[in-house]
Image: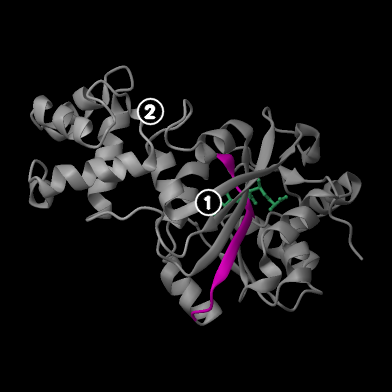
Amino acid sequence: MIDLSNPAVVRGILERHGLRLSKGLGQNFLINPTVCPRMAEASGAAETGGVLEIGPGIGVLTRELARVSRKVVAVELDQRLLPVLGETLGDCPNVELVQGDIMKLDLHRLVREKFEGKRICVCANLPYYITSPVVMSLLESGLPLSSVTVMVQREAAQRLCAPPGGRACGAVSVSVHYHSQPQILFGVSRGSFLPPPRVESAVIRFQMREEPPVAVDSEAMLFRVARAAFSQRRKTAANAISAGLNLPKEQVAGALEAIGAGAAARAEQLTLEQLAALANTLTSSRILSEEAFL
Ligand code: SAM
């Protein structure tokens, strides 16, 4: 059986196909033999209707996913890798390859057509240049996902998983925690890749929530308030929200007092529950109206 975590085998395949790896496409392939089985196991792929993989490369993670899951659909942007994948996945009949850009594909249609509406998971060693937009659009997509398990830069992992109400949090933390329960599973060293990237990596899993953890009158309002609050981190939340949403500062400060956070609170001191209560207070007291943003 082909061993895609053996650097000599990988180099041989690339040479035979006359391929040079593209830095621009984030082509750092996994060669640590323990990482792909751990990722495939942790993704929960065995218990779902299938797996969507982003960027199969030459198929090292794809093969592990094919081993544990009934169906794998792998989306690869680089056309040059398709003949290679045809070869390395030739003995995996439950893998389907799609050539395309994950940022541009209609994922609702893809999932409907390839998985017949079943609940699936996502598992990928993501190209780092699109980590945040891919993760955020998956979490906010409303796709039938049970979890998203991805390899990202270590710093991105820490930022994405930081809970609201802690020093490292930002507006994305609010959305991440609203839609999922994130967890850093394990770190991965630079030497686990060919070629080694400049930074350390980590595997994170977002377990999708069936119900949101807080009740809000409008999700859109919660995210608008969060974005405004974190847009100017040196200011108090009242100042940042009042400037970002063009609202009278006294009223925002009053709403912060009303929810028990204090008028001088900063965005990173507000928990998800407090941000939800703030968005609800601003909307119900008509300080903030949905129409104002239409
Ligand atoms: N899964 C392989 C592994 O673990 O060795 C390769 C991972 S490599 C970090 C990222 C892969 O994503 C590359 O194969 C790259 O060509 C592909 N890729 C880059 N941008 C993409 C995009 N916008 N849509 C789909 N695939 C993309």
Q: Which residues are magenta?
A: 117-128
Say which mark, if any, is on residue 269. Answer: 2
Mark 1 residue type: Gln
Name the spot of residue 267 as percent of width and height, x first. 33, 28
Name the spot of residue 139 as percent of width and height, x first. 45, 55
Magenta stretch: residue 78 in it? no
Q: Is residue 201 above or below residue 234?
A: below
Say which mark, if any, is on residue 181. Answer: 1
| Closer to the eye: label 1 or 2 | 2
Name the spot of residue 104 as percent of width and height, x first. 42, 58
Magenta stretch: residue 125 in it? yes
Foreground residue among 240 and 7: 240
In this view, the residue farthest toward the bottom is 116
**Residue at image coords 31%, 55%:** 215
**Residue at image coords 32%, 24%:** 266
Is residue 123 left or right of 169 when viewed as pictured? right
